[in-house]
């Protein structure tokens, strides 16, 4: 083989290698983008579940005349007595989604004056509930 043929062959090989590496790079970037989107989706789902749990506990605390105490990931304590106080949970949720923190805070009930009485009444009512199975009667 003379030098001209070797040079053309080398150029063809370099061009093929360039396109192969460019393709691998493009696929890698696409894979990274999909991974980042999945991580963001997972964080949003966890934040949504945390917020839903907070609303459920808030409604339960209203039902039993208790207060809800929320401690964020920094250790700051908030007493949640009305809907406006739920903004502290929103802040916690936004920080988690943005990636500023990797954990959530916690909830705790603070019993009120009538809390035990309402829980006792609820448990007493549950004792008297009967579930009927109509298939067994036939």
Image: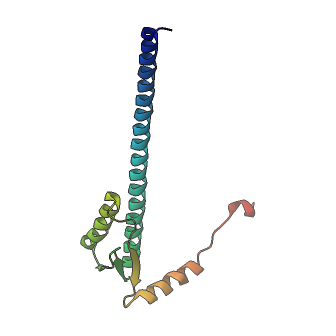
- Number of marks: 0
Identify the image quadrant of residue 8.
top left
| Residue 87 to residue 122: above or below | above
Where residue 11 sits: x, y (%)? 41, 17
Find the residue positioned furthest to the front.
2
Where residue 134 sits: x, y (%)? 69, 61
| Residue 10 to residue 64: above or below | above
Residue placed most toward the observer, 128 or 97: 97
Identify the image quadrant of residue 64.
bottom left
Residue placed most toward the observer, 30 or 70: 30
- Give the residue at x 35% y 80%: 69
Name the side, left or right, on which 116 lies relative to 97.
right
Name the side, left or right, on which 13 lies relative to 99.
right
Residue placed most toward the observer, 84 or 98: 98
| Residue 20 to residue 96: above or below | above
- Give the residue at x 59% y 80%: 127
| Residue 92 to residue 70: above or below | above
Where residue 102 sits: x, y (%)? 39, 65
């Amino acid at each position: 083989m003379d030098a001209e043929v070797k040079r053309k062959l080398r150029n063809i090989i370099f061009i093929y290698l360039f396109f192969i590496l460019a393709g691998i790079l493009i696929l890698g970037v696409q894979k990274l983008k999909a991974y980042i989107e999945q991580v963001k989706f997972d964080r949003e789902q966890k934040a949504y579940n945390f917020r839903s749990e907070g609303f459920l506990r808030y409604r339960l605390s209203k039902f039993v005349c208790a207060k809800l105490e929320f401690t964020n990931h920094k250790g700051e304590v908030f007493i949640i007595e009305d809907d406006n106080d739920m903004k502290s949970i929103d802040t916690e949720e936004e920080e988690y989604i943005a990636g500023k923190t990797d954990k959530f805070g916690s909830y705790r009930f603070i019993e009120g004056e009538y809390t035990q009485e309402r829980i006792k009444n609820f448990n007493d009512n549950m004792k008297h509930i009967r579930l009927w199975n109509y298939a067994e009667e036939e």
